[in-house]
Amino acid sequence: MKNLMLFLLVASSCAPVYVPNARNSPLFTKAGELQGSVQFGNGLDLQGAVSVTKHIGLMANYSYADRKSNPYDTDNLDEYHYHNFFEGGVGYYENQGNWCYEIFAGYGKGEGASYDTYAWWGSQSERATGKYERYFIQPAFGLNKNIMHVSFVPRISIVNFTEFSNDLVTYPIDDNPRVFIEPAVIGRVNLMENHLFFVFQAGVSFPATSNLYYEYRPFQFSTGMGFRFGGLKKEPLPDQ
């Protein structure tokens, strides 16, 4: 009965409760490299990564947005949104000259809030907060040039909402996690001998199945600045 209730969502709102965070693709060159960035787009995204050996790296990501200035303004329900998410991951990387690849996997927890209509609360739109956990696997393939880094990141995320709550009650969720396909393209323009970079990315997110009971954000864009310490300074080829 509970599973049946989940699929009776009246999808009348475009306000997302799940917003994918920006992808973190460090494209390490050697051990001891430290990276960090601040990006803005679908909120604030903070990213960090460190290569602990010449093939193993760690990453941590934080995503936040708060558009709740008028939470009870019924003319702006689609503008109401909040999310708070943190994750960590470990990965393997290879760097062969200008070409490189990596694969990371990890886990995170967060929450998102928006106005939407859910069957377990009747037909009235409610301000709902959903708590979830997420597992991800993230391969990436990159071109690692002196001036420009480009990375294609076909991330796969498993999103598991555990509860939804409004101002009065909490509704526990007992349903299967949903798989999202979340590819993105990341570009970096390197400055100050690769120690500083301008970063931008564009991505999409779509579920592997159509029986969702919550809204999500299908397009993600972000831009910002980052730093890199300890990375390999590439020397020009003899004919350059």
Image (cartoon, rainbow, N blue to C red):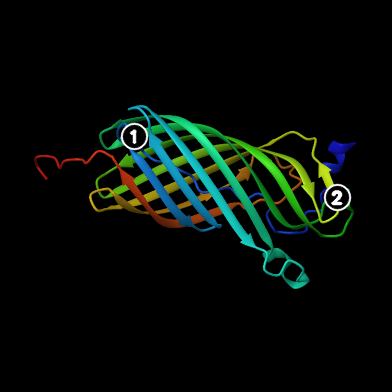
Front one among 194 and 206: 194
Q: Which of the 4 quarters of the picture holds residue 64?
A: bottom right
Label drawn at residue 169: 2
From mark 1 to mark 2, how far is it between C-alphas?
49 Å
Q: Secondary structure at mark 2?
A: loop
Image position, residue 158 (x, y; %): 63, 36
Q: Amino acid at mark 2?
A: Val
Question: Which one is closest to the eye, mark 1 or mark 2?
Answer: 2
Q: Amino acid at mark 1?
A: Cys
Residue 32 numbered tag:
none
Residue 171, position as x, y percentages in the image: 83, 44
> As displayed, is residue 175 above or below residue 35?
above
Q: Is residue 55 above or below residue 179?
A: above
11 left or right of 45 in image: right
Instruction: Tell whether 130 sits left or right of 44.
Output: right
The residue positioned 22% from the left and 41% from the top of the image is 233
Can residue 11 be seen here? The reply is: yes
Q: Quadrant of residue 31?
A: top left
* Along the line of sight, the residue nearer the viewer: 79 or 181: 79
Which quadrant is the N terminus positioned in? top right
Residue at x 49%, y 45% (from the top left corner): 23
Residue 195 x, y percent position in the rendering: 28, 49
Quarter of the picture holding the C terminus? top left
Q: Which residue is identified by label 1?
A: 100
Mark 2 residue crowding within 10 angstroms, few (<14) / some (14–19) / many (20+):
few
* 66 relative to 158, above or below: below
* Residue 7 shows in this picture: no
Is 56 on the left-hand or right-hand side of 85?
Answer: left
